[in-house]
Structures are given as structure tokens and as C-alpha cells.
Amino acid sequence: MNIPKVIDDVVKNNLCIGCGLCVYKCPSKALEMKWDENGFLIPVLTGNCDLIGDCITVCPFNPFPEKEVETENELAELFLKNATLTDPKIGKYLGVYAGYSEEFRLTSSSGGVATFILTDLLERGIVNHIFSVKESSAQGAHYEYAISNNKEELLATSKTKYYPVTLASVFLKIHELEGNVAIVGVACFIKAIRLAQFNEPALKDKIQFLVGIICGGVKSSFYTEYLSEKAGVPSKSCFKPSYRIKDFKSTAGDYSFGCYSNIDNKKKTIKMNPLGDMWGTGLFKSNACDFCDDVTTELADISLGDAWLDPFIKDGEGTNIIITRSTLAEKIITDGIKLKKIQIEQLPIKKLTSSLGGAYNHRQTGQSYRIKRILKTGYLMPPKRFDNDNKLAYDLRIIQFLRMNIRKMSLNVWRDERNALIFDRRMRSQLNLLKKITKLSHYRRAIFTKDFVKKIMRKIIR
Ligand SMILES: Cc1cc2nc3c(=O)[nH]c(=O)nc-3n(C[C@H](O)[C@H](O)[C@H](O)COP(=O)(O)OP(=O)(O)OC[C@H]3O[C@@H](n4cnc5c(N)ncnc54)[C@H](O)[C@@H]3O)c2cc1C
């Protein structure tokens, strides 16, 4: 492949994540975000390309970034100067916590800390506008980025949407807005915003705060179609999909998907657990996510995720894991604790990283194997921070291979069939194989842990 010069080269390199910052950056206004055949948003050339290549400078998956902003590490040095602590797994930080917001927990996906932080920023007058995700008014899209100017508008944007969204439309309006902005986004979107701030210093003042959503992968719109069919609503009739319906009386992981049908205006729901593993398998995921090694959204002022951890996981009302990376983020959290607006406790880093164990195994430990395979097929790869392919055990390599295959196959099969029964049947053998090998791999790793060997040695010596 030729050295990429414009964003279309990133799209052809199959690494576009749909953030849309290229659309904002294009001096000729020649790009528009459109749906591709796999249910993702991508930039499409609708005017004359000037070939200057400004678009690619803000791309989080630009294969040849400038040295000063080569990876998340360089960007963190530039943008998170007050984060005095560094950890190889979570990046630069000030504090690590777990907890929830008293006011927003029940109307949010985890502990409601994202909505708490954003409300607080508005109330303090630090920002006047929030870019976050709400129901879309556009035909053919369930959700989109929107601009909220007050608490009431903001509340309509709470909750996690496992659905492709783009920053393009809101970013095109950023300079028309009076006052400052805060933005919520997943890791690659936050990286794109940092690259835009690096290229255009005026954006550093304009965008005062970034709320980072810890992300296990961006799903295609096919994911919503599949879940809707599983819930008993034909995907074309589905509206208001809801991905994280809590069961307050159960555990945090025991949530449901639900959506309305425009046939009878009734809501149907389905528990997610019986549907199987939707995340570790790679189902319906963007290819770019397989080449993102930023597990905790390292470039945001604050990073928020789900506390998949004891004892929090037992509480169906939901709890966040929280990493503060700027003094303002740390102040909002400590003030919130003092005023009893949030119930938060400090969390050892080891506990936080154990909540994200699967993500570290896939995104950092297993990444080099995937990169090697991709490079062999002639695709290009941006510089990455983790390289341990030679140390990766054979069972883990097979797991990586199967996940890559399942990811691609799930998109192809859904595109062809659009039927959940046929989809399940066609995916079954690959998913079963992955399940079996993953189980064997767990046994193998348990046997070779130090604790296990010590136990055996003690028995022999006795
Ligand atoms: C695609 C995706 C994958 C995720 N994977 C993981 C994971 O593997 N592990 C983990 O610990 N946490 C993950 N999360 C984060 C988790 O689901 C919660 O969003 C997070 O814990 C914040 O919860 P909250 O209750 O504080 O948020 P809320 O108070 O409910 O607010 C959520 C905020 O996120 C915004 N938002 C919703 N959807 C999106 C989106 N697609 N893109 C950008 N912003 C959005 C909303 O507009 C709102 O501002 C994921 C989130 C997303 C969107």
C-alpha cells in the first residue's frame, strides 16, 4: 500500500473508526460522514480533495503520525502535565476510585459519574456546552452526538449507547458556540480531539474538559439490529434501543437490551447474559478497535468505566471505576465527596486493572500477534506501544486468530442474512471453538501460575 496522504487511505486501510474529525479538519469541506456496507460511519469524499492532507493529521489511526504525537504517551505528556503519577497500565493519573453519583446512578448505565461530572462543569460555569450522545432525529440513525446547553438537555444524553456515532456534525459548529465546551468520548475519539488541539491551539481553550469513556470496542449498527431481532422486534421496526437496562435487584452484569417496535409501539426486552459473550468474541466490532492499545482512555481529564469487581458487581444499581488525570477532575471528585453528592472510595490500581483484565489481555498482550498478521496482508499500522508477540503462548495465538475471524465473519454474515436465527446457526461452530480453546487456555494458565506450582511443591515436600 502507498503511504497514506488523505483520510480515504485510512478508510482503505480498514482502520477508520468514524470519529469524523477529518470532516471538521478538511479545508475544502469535501468530506461527509456516511454509513458503509458494514454498519459503520466513514468519511466519504463529496467534493474536490485538495490533497493537502490536513484530514489525516487528526486521525487516531494515521499510520504515519508526527513524532511529537506518535502515540498516547507523547500526547499525554503534552496534555496532562498536572497528572504527576504514571502507571504502565493506566497511563498518567492523579487518583483512582470506585463509586457512584447519588443523583444520577439510577438513570445512568454504571454509577452516573459521567452525568455528575458534566452537570458539575455546567454548574461551575467552566463550560457552556456539552457534546454527548442522544437520540437522533435523522432518518436511519438511532443515536448521534448532540450539543446540550443546560442540565435538562444533558440528562437526555445519559446512558451507554453501543452504536456508531460521529463527532463530525457537532465539531463543525464548535466555533459558532459562545463559551467553552466539554466532550464525552471513547479512547480513539478523545485521541482525535487531542490531535485536533495539537494542530489548532485555539481548541485547547475552547475544549475545557474531556470525559473519557472506557471502551471495550465500537460496535456496528448490525449489533443493534441483531439484538432487536433477538428481542422479538424486526430490526427495521426497532426504535429507542436501550443497551443497559438495569435490574436493581440483581447484579450489575445482569442487564437487558430493550427497544420499541413501531408496529405496536410496545417495548420488548431481552436479558444479555443468555445471549453469550458479545465482547470477548469480537462480534460486530470495528477492525480499528483491534489495533487500539488504550484500555483506560488515557488522554481524557477523567476516565470512567464499569466496576466489574467485587463487591460493586453485586450491586445492580451500578458503580463506576474512575481515574482522574487533571487537577480540575480531581477537584470535582473531592468536592463531590465533601458535599456528599457522590459516594466514592479510593481503589488500588491492581483492583481497577483486574476489572479490565480481559481488555488488557486482548488489546495489549495479544495485539502484536494481530499486527503481524495484518502487516503480512499488506495493510499499514500506526506505531503501537506493546510488542510481545514472541512471548505469546500458542493457545493465545489461536484465540487471537479466532477472534479476528469471528469479528469479520459476524459482519459478513449479518450483511448477507439480516436474520438472527440464521446468524446464530452460521456463527455457532466458530463461537463454540473459541469458547473451548479459551477454557483450555484458562486451565493451562491456572496450572502454570506460581501459586499452583507452590501448592504442588508443598504437597510433594510434605
Ligand atoms: C461503546 C462502549 C463500550 C464500552 N465498553 C466498556 C468496557 O468494556 N468496560 C468498561 O468498564 N466500560 C465500558 N464502557 C463504559 C460504560 O458503559 C459507561 O459508559 C461508563 O462506565 C460511564 O457510566 P456512567 O454511568 O458514569 O455514564 P452515564 O451517566 O450513563 O453517561 C454516559 C455518557 O456517555 C455518553 N455516551 C453514550 N454512548 C456513547 C458513545 N457510544 N460514545 C461516546 N459517548 C457515549 C452519554 O452521552 C453520556 O454522556 C463502554 C461504553 C461504550 C459507549
Image: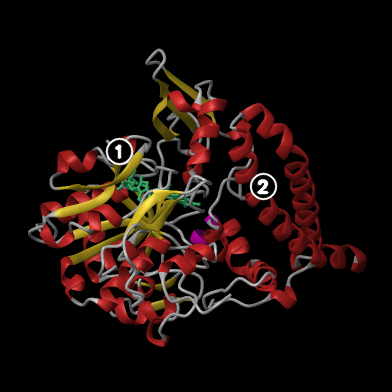
> Is 353 part of what is drawn in magenta?
yes
- Main SS class of the magenta portion in the image: helix
Say left or right for 330 vs 287.
Answer: left
Q: Is residue 75 visible?
A: yes
- For the view shown, which residue lies furthest in the top direction? 264
Residue occupying image coordinates x 38% and y 86%? 68
Q: Position of residue 282 (x, y in %)?
A: 61, 50
Total labels: the figure holds: 2
Report which quarter residue 239 is drawn in: top left
SS at badge 2: helix
In front here: 142 or 302?
A: 142
Residue occupying image coordinates x 46% and y 55%? 215
Magenta region, residue range: 351-355
Q: Are marks 1 and 2 in contact (CB under 8 Å)?
A: no
Say left or right for 31 vs 311.
Answer: left
Residue 323 numbered tag? none
Residue occupying image coordinates x 43% and y 75%? 72
In front here: 328 or 175?
A: 175
Q: Position of residue 173 (x, y in %)?
A: 18, 56
Indicate the quadrant containing the C terminus: top left, top right, bottom left or bottom right. bottom right
Give, as a three-letter code, the residue at label 2.
Met
Give, as a three-letter code, the residue at label 1.
Ser
Say left or right for 391 vs 63.
Answer: right
Q: Which residue is mark 1?
A: 136
SS at badge 1: loop
Of the two numbered discs 1 and 2 on the same chain, state the one appearing first in sequence: 1
Q: Which residue is mark 2?
A: 409
